[in-house]
Image (tube, helix red, strand yellow):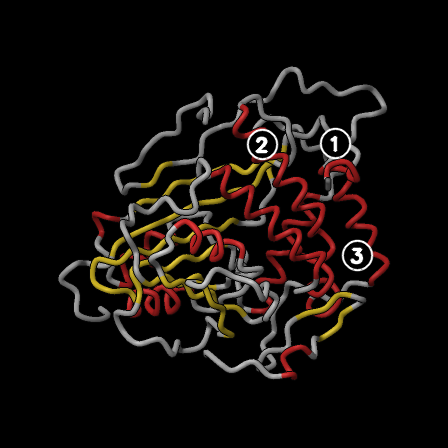
Amino acid sequence: MSEPHTAPPATSDHTTQAADIIVDPAFIVDGDNDAIDSESTLSSTASLSSSIYNYRKVHGRTFQNFKDVDHWAPNDDAHNDALDLHHHMTLLLHDDKLHVAPIENPKRVLDVGTGTGIWAIDFADQYPSAQVIGTDLSPTQPAWTPPNCKFELEDATLEWTFPDNSFDFVHISYLLGCIEDWQSLYEQVYRCLKPGGWFEHTDFTIRIGTDDNSIPDDSPYPTWNKFFEDAGKKRGRTFNVVDGNQQADWMKTAGFATSSIRVTKYKLPIGEWPADKRWKAVGAYNLAGSLQGLEGYGIYLGTEVLGWNLDDLKVLFARMRKDMTNKSIHAHYPAATAYAQKPVESHGTN
């Protein structure tokens, strides 16, 4: 795949900063018809029991009901479709690779917060000799899976029940707003990895911006950014996961080999405005997934956490859809992928 037109600078701590994305000059605003048609864009381990399926309902959306855990995102089909669209977006982001960490012949693999299970299933297909476990708060994964893939109910924020030195590879993606203590999570990953095992974490921060000042003054984007900032503070679970050097710092503190830590920062475009084909495709799937998941992202946090009136929230959703599909706005938000290796001679946690 082609690379971004502007080479990102590398820093001394093995962090590759996000590259600027060049706007496609052919992506022209057509007078009054400057909005994309959103309909065309959208083409601790436990045994399963019946109570798990007694989902919480908030304004017509369903949410997990595992051990009364307060989770902000829905688990219904509409939201799961958004998760699968963002999974494909991530594949494009990673040059059609399920991982960027340099793993070789993994035997035991853990996918934390597996969601629909699509990554775990694809990984099990790609590595048929590996045993893949996907954990999540909701049993929404398909019943038919590869024989080397299984799913378990697990609250990643509690102490894990997996033994020390269990896995060759641990994978996490998009748990923003879900984790109260990221450092503790990274330390659990470290404990459960075998010496020499690898950890990879991809995530983003909800802070929509632009490089060319194309976001108008009356845009809902600043309101949307503050919405998640306030919700994260109120719940004690931040939506700001990748802005600074958090991932690398958490890895170093947990005990991962400093020389192995790599962090690549991205600007995820919203829409097909980039000139580069790779970023145009990333932006297309990002837009589709974001439109599909928009209401699910905000419905619980808005009404149950921040006290918004439902009608006002619906107005915000409508304004967001309008700006997300506006061709004249070249918006993006920050994301990052970090990976690191547990020292080969390690015999436990730090």
Q: Which residue is mark 3?
A: 313
Mark 3 / mark 1, whichever is N-terminal: 3
* Mark 3 or mark 2, earlier in chain: 2
Depth check: give the residue in front, 87 or 15.
Answer: 87
**36 left or right of 196 in image:** right
What's the mark number on residue 262? none
Q: Secondary structure at mark 3?
A: helix
Residue lying at the far top of the rendered structure: 26
In three-dimensional space, the C-alpha distance between marks 3 and 2, rounded to whole angstroms, equals: 30 Å
Residue 22 seen from this side: yes
**In this rendering, is residue 64 above or below 104?**
below
Mark 2 residue type? Ala
Image quarter where the N terminus lies is top left
- Residue occupying image coordinates x 31% and y 57%: 251
The residue labelled by disc 1 is 326
- Tell me the quarter of the picture where residue 350 sits: bottom left
